[in-house]
Amino acid sequence: MPSAAVITAALTGPIATKVDNPHLPTTPDEIATAAADAHAAGAAVVHVHVRDEEGRPTADLEIARRTVGLIAEACPALVQLSTGVGLTVPFEARERLIEARPRMATLNVCSMTFGTGEFRNPPDGVRRLADRMRELDIKPELEVYDTGHLEVALTLHAEGLLAEPLQFSFVLGVRGGAAATAENLLAMIARLPEGAIWQVIAIGRANLELTAIGLALGGNARTGMEDTLLLRRGVPAGSNAQLVERLVSVARALEREPAGIEETGQRLSLPGGAFAQAGNP
Ligand code: KMH
Ligand code: ZN
């Protein structure tokens, strides 16, 4: 029988603004409300970027702490804080964000060209961040934008910096990373170690198709206004919850029920159990 699919809602991201879509949540309160609605629609995990008062991506620890706390008050969804933050924020500020003590956080394993900018993830910094995540019992999601990044992640594992099960996001369609094609996805899946957990993050037009292919192949799935502002071609998303509802219906059509919090915690071997209080040191 096919397993349940862990659905992640990427609520905000670093790039879009309310001008692009007025429903984009940007303040801690808006993000917490969007998290609760996305959770009610079927998301077990919420992937969170925070913004400053001007709406710019920030690694401000106080804003992150407030946001993680408000989400924990609003719903039991597992909080995955982005340490990718945004291209304008230095790595050394980004890595401190995990001191806000989310249950999960992203670990971008390589530097790369990212669209017209640069995404800096230096090897020593990545190792330091992975080490600190282990110390704090924060589950890393390994962000892999190309096949070479996957090899670096496997090296980190071989060095003892990552606990099993390894959790991967295959990010496809960033200019500077692998293109959003089924062939690229299959090549990456073929290199996964036994027992690894994975999902597709497909940027742009191929978002829904590649997410569906990922689900059909046994992966988990992510949606949300970080990845797409459109419900379908020409139709802006009215909320993150609407995007989650759409993804849940795709998953169910493939006989993949959305995984609940407890099952997600077990599948990811989250330390402290699925319901350990988010935001607590
Ligand atoms: N925004 C995506 C390209 C992160 O936030 O650390 C990947 C992502 C990674 O969500
Ligand atoms: Zn992100």
Image (tube, rainbow, N blue to C red):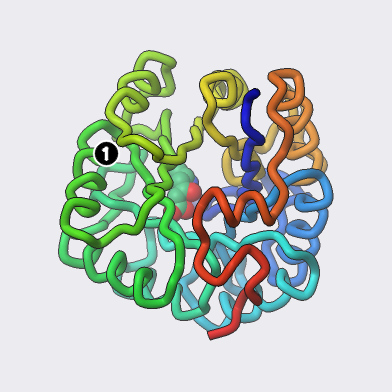
In the image, residue 127 above or below residue 20 = below
As drawn, is 223 to the left or to the right of 174? right
The structure residue drawn at horizontal position 38% and vertical position 66%, both measured from the top left corner, is: 89
Q: Residues within 10 Å of mark 1 (few under 14, many from 20)?
A: many
Based on the displayed image, in which of its 4 quarters is residue 152 positioned?
Answer: top left
136, 41: nearer the viewer: 136
- Residue 85, visible in the rendered structure: no
Q: Residue 70: x percent and y percent?
A: 73, 75
Q: Residue 239: x percent and y percent?
A: 79, 45
**Residue linked to disc 1:** 150
Ligand 1 closer than 8 Å to the CB at disc 1?
Answer: no
State how many labels appear. 1
Q: What residue type is disc 1 on? A: Leu
As drawn, is 181 to the left or to the right of 30? left
The structure residue drawn at horizontal position 43% and vertical position 15%, both measured from the top left corner, is: 182
Q: Residue 154: x percent and y percent?
A: 23, 44
Q: Residue 147: x percent and y percent?
A: 25, 31
Based on the displayed image, in which of its 4 quarters is residue 71 positioned?
Answer: bottom right
As drawn, is 114 to the left or to the right of 253? left
In the image, residue 53 above or below residue 21 = below
Based on the displayed image, in which of its 4 quarters is residue 79 positioned?
Answer: bottom right
253, 67: nearer the viewer: 253
In the image, residue 96 above or below residue 232 = below
- Residue 189, visible in the rendered structure: yes
Q: Judging from the image, what secondary structure is the residue with disc 1 in? A: helix
As drawn, is 129 to the left or to the right of 123? right
The structure residue drawn at horizontal position 63% and vertical position 53%, both measured from the top left corner, is: 45
Residue that lies at the very extreme toward the top in this rendered image = 183
The structure residue drawn at horizontal position 27% and vertical position 28%, both measured from the top left corner, is: 191
Quadrant the N terminus occupies: top right
98, 189: nearer the viewer: 189
